[in-house]
Image: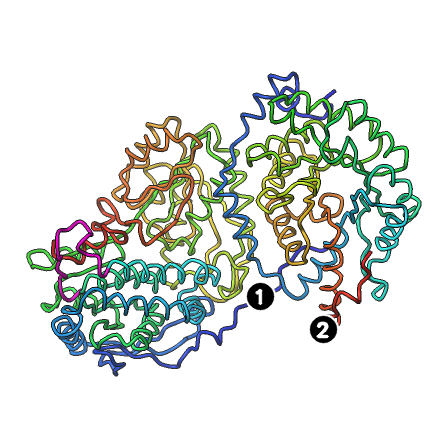
Amino acid sequence: MPAFDYAPAPESRDLANLKPSYRPFIGGEFVDGGGEPLKSVNPATEEVLAEVGTADANDLDAAVRAARTAFEKTWGPMPGSERAKYLFRIARLVQERSRELAVLETLDNGKPITESRDSDLPLVAAHFFYHAGWADKLDYAGYGPGPKPLGVAGQIIPWNFPLLMLAWKIAPALATGNTVVLKPAETTPLTALVFADICRQAGLPAGVVNIVPGAGDLGAKLVSHPGVDKIAFTGSTEVGKLIQREVAGTPKRLTLELGGKAANVVFDDAPLDQAVEGIVNGIFFNQGHVCCAGSRLLVQESVADELLEKLRHRISTLRLGDPLDKNTDVGAINSREQLDKIRELAESGEAEGAQRWTSPCPVPDRGFFFAPTVFSGVHQSMRIAREEIFGPVLSVLTFRTPDEAVAKANNTPYGLSAGIWSEKGSRILWMANRLRAGVVWANTFNRFDPAAPFGGYQESGFGREGGRTGLEGYLDV
Amino acid sequence: MSAPTLPAALADATRDDASLRRFLHGLPGVDQVGVEARATALATRSIKKSSKLWAIDTAISMVDLTTLEGADTHGKVRALTAKAKRPDPDHPDTPQVAAVCVYPDLAATAVEGLTGTGIGVASVATAFPSGRSSRQVKLADVALAVESGASEVDMVIDRGAFLEGRYGAVFEEIQAVKAACGGAHLKVILETGELASYDNVRRASWLALLAGGDFIKTSTGKVSPAATLPVTHVMLQAVRDWYTATGELRGVKPAGGIRTTKDAIKYLVAVHEVAGEQWLTPQLFRFGASSLLNDLLMQRRTQHDGHYSGPDYVAVD
């Protein structure tokens, strides 16, 4: 009997409505940026998708000015109930255009269409709906009567969840009455500029949202711009530290959401098959380009062999390939630079003596791909246990007792997320209280909800996004 | 009389009632949210073109074409055997189904209609569907099926005993039925709709495998919910774990409530990715269904002819 080979089932790329060029969105209009245009590349094929105009210093000034004017004249003074209407409208438009946005996100980022369609886009809409609800209820958010917005927020987002990170930044800022200048990542600017079109479609007053594509130097200019009241950054710890240094001594507020090296802790009484699912979801979701990825698996020694055997079988069923194919589980690495970094770290794992296992799945000849990889026999001292790989590479460590699990899980400069797998509720609560991580998942992983605050400890940053707590980052309280 | 091939740990588990209970309660739990999320996610696989055709033909070859009504007659069973042999007379290349599934008093009629075709005759037994009778009556039921020539016996477990925690009683009964089956294949119906939790489904699956069941089957079709994807996931995991532990391949049969090609393909994807490619054969996976076959035939025609034909173009029974 022949094998059950799934025939290609690609989503139509025409849905993305891809244009040959995109331009910065400043003061309610798409304008020619003065910066050197950049080319956005499809990481699955290495072909150029579109040319994107970038902002230079003058454009940035114009964007900050437009945001300031909007803050003072229209958006700031507007009653919350009116702001809510715009946010609801944006949320509905995101839903209406979700197929277009999902396909475009997949083309630009390399993530599988099932993820952009079933995870990213629904969450984007949910964030706008959720925060629209807050806009007229800020008096009841727990910050006293009439909490005031900060003003102009400069926001810098990464390439791993281009549109979702935009939503996490823009929705709370707008709900609380701030205006924004947002810089999307250099390699994934396209959906942000379609979002700009949605703002226009929604009739959002000019200058409330400004999108300025560009590279890191533009981000640095935004951070140091005197007209900005608040900086919100999601990205690497390295850049986060530079930003914090730059902002120190100024009146600017700052929230940082940085890297992570999350522990996913599996006890011997865990529901093993579901733990396997959670481990796979924790590290291979979005090719492991997730700051809260469960990149360190801590498994109790008594079940380690059984769990690893199940895990390898499960990982070998993951389908790597064309991100637009509806049956693809693991898509493309976002850039060659990132691919090189993952390769380098994986090689260090081998050099330091960990045992490497790579999924036997076929890897396309073209594009940036990295087959799901598991390192066992990893020790706390190895680089692959300490450094964020930001790719589909899992490091497996073992522990003997709950105390040892806590010690190893916390033995990292990061502290963004963690997972606990056990059928014993008391153990989960005991452990969750001892883990230094902003988010602790129990018997699940990588679950997000706009009502749940997200953020980290130590080098994973500070400030929370989402929920009531997330509003604080955009209010003068 | 546990099977002699069992590894020591598993043989130990069946030593007495207490060992059996310790073993079953020591199996890893099943997280309800997790298994349902996985089943939902896997059901989004998009099976098109050549893989869809392959899946349709494979699904047809896995159908246990079933009639289990009080109103069943010899005539009805004869019609069913004719359909089993030639599911779609206009398309003679359509595969035959795996078996015809009937009550034991009609098994002889089914055998008569299917002799020499390679199509199995499955007979339900053991006071199907409730299983509420004496051991003697249940074994007599099995004897009737076997003497009538049934090649497969679909027994029901004693859910009452299982829920009371009398695992040993359930185990012995399955063993006794297995012995009474002789050369006939034994499918053990867990009636998962009455077991209430996925943990219980896992325990019942292992119990049936330990006792020598060749197949574990979800449901009688008389209790709602019948087969569901997450329950089938748990059972597929059980046969995979069994294979890992013993090297033996055992089968899974979801039954009841699977009516469309779309549903059937979701099950095949689960078989493929949860248990593994080896299980994609009628020897190891069956669908207990009656109306499913016609939907598969209609979809098959659509794939071959390029247009939809409608229910009047396939035989009702």
Q: Residue at x 73, y 59 (%)?
A: B296
Q: Residue furthest front?
A: B71
Amino acid type at circle 1 is Ala
Q: Which chain contains the residue that carries disc 1?
A: A
Residue appearing at x 56%, y 36% in the figure:
B198
Q: Residues within 10 Å of mark 1 (few under 14, many from 20)?
A: some
**Relative to B144, is A128 on the left or the right?**
left
User: Which of the pair A164/A245 is nearer the observer?
Assistant: A164
What segment is highlighted magenta in the picture? A135-153
The residue carrying mark 2 is B306
Query: Residue B82: horizontal and vertical position, in percent?
Result: 88, 54
Crowding at label 2, few (<14), some or many (≥20) Cα neighbours within 10 Å? Answer: few
For the C terminus of chain B, give its image quadrant. Answer: bottom right
Q: CA distance from mark 2 to mark 1?
A: 18 Å
Write the residue at 67% across / 62% down. B52
Circle 1: element type: loop
Q: Identify residue type, mark 2.
A: Gly
Marks 2, 1: nearer the viewer: 2
Residues tagged by mark 2 and mark 1 found on one chain of the structure: no
For the N terminus of chain B, give its image quadrant. top right
Q: x%, y% of residue B114?
A: 90, 48
Q: How is the image coloured?
A: rainbow
User: What residue would you read off at disc 1?
Assistant: A9
